[in-house]
Amino acid sequence: MEVNHISKSYGKKTIINDISFTVNAGEVYALVGPNGAGKTTIIRLVTGLSFPSAGDVKLFGEDASKKPSLRRKLGAVVEAPAAFYPYLSGEANLKLHAKLAGGVKTERIAQVLKMMELSYAKDQKVATYSLGMRQRLGVAAAVLTEPEILILDEPASGMDPLSLHLVHSVLQNAAQNGAAVLLSTHHL
């Protein structure tokens, strides 16, 4: 993944200006900064939820704005707590996510639920999940398809120390398996 001289302005207000970085396969790259620093804006530009005022994003060596289908290969968590159907179970939400992503084996859904220590809550409606549980479900959804590029916006928000450890393990595992990992956070 390459981010080349991207800038984003809303009207006359410049949010980010001339940002460039590369995340190679097997690397974890963290965007660290306080609220309002532009981390989520960068994530939204990389995932295609917004478009840069200048510069470009390359995924797999190709300009993502000219080939939007490349973004379907991403595993991403952006605004995770709002990304699920609250009256479906955690498992049903992952099954729906898997179907939209082209399908994965049932065993993989069970595997990511176990990885994020959500197996016990798989049949509970997401509306009953704590913020930390919804964040962990978001990470489970992002890694479900074993993407080559994994992007997470504030994955540790609302998490206790055990959940933070789980997320760090999942990110390290993804990178060790060759994924390029980009995340935003307030702290490392």
Image (cartoon, rainbow, N blue to C red):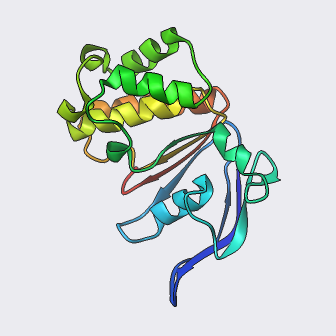
Between 115 and 106, the one lying in front of the other is: 106
How many numbered marks have been drawn onto this rendered protein structure? Answer: 0
Left or right: where 46 falls relative to 82: right
Q: Is residue 164 visible?
A: no
Horizontal and vertical percent position of residue 126: 26, 31
Query: Residue 100, relative to residue 5: is it above or below?
Result: above
Left or right: where 166 falls relative to 43: left
Spot the residue most to the bottom. Answer: 12
- Residue at point 59%, 61% (across, down): 45
Q: Quadrant of residue 105?
A: top right
Horizontal and vertical percent position of residue 95: 45, 22
- Residue at point 46%, 31% (across, down): 141
Q: Is residue 135 visible?
A: yes
Spot the residue most to the top. Answer: 107
- Residue at point 70%, 38% (across, down): 25
Q: Quadrant of residue 131?
A: top left
Query: Residue 141, relative to residue 12: is it above or below?
Result: above
Spot the residue most to the front. Answer: 87
Query: Residue 167, relative to residue 69: is it above or below?
Result: above
Horizontal and vertical percent position of residue 110: 42, 12
Between 123 and 120, the one lying in front of the other is: 123
- Residue at point 35%, 33% (across, down): 136
Horizontal and vertical percent position of residue 157: 31, 48
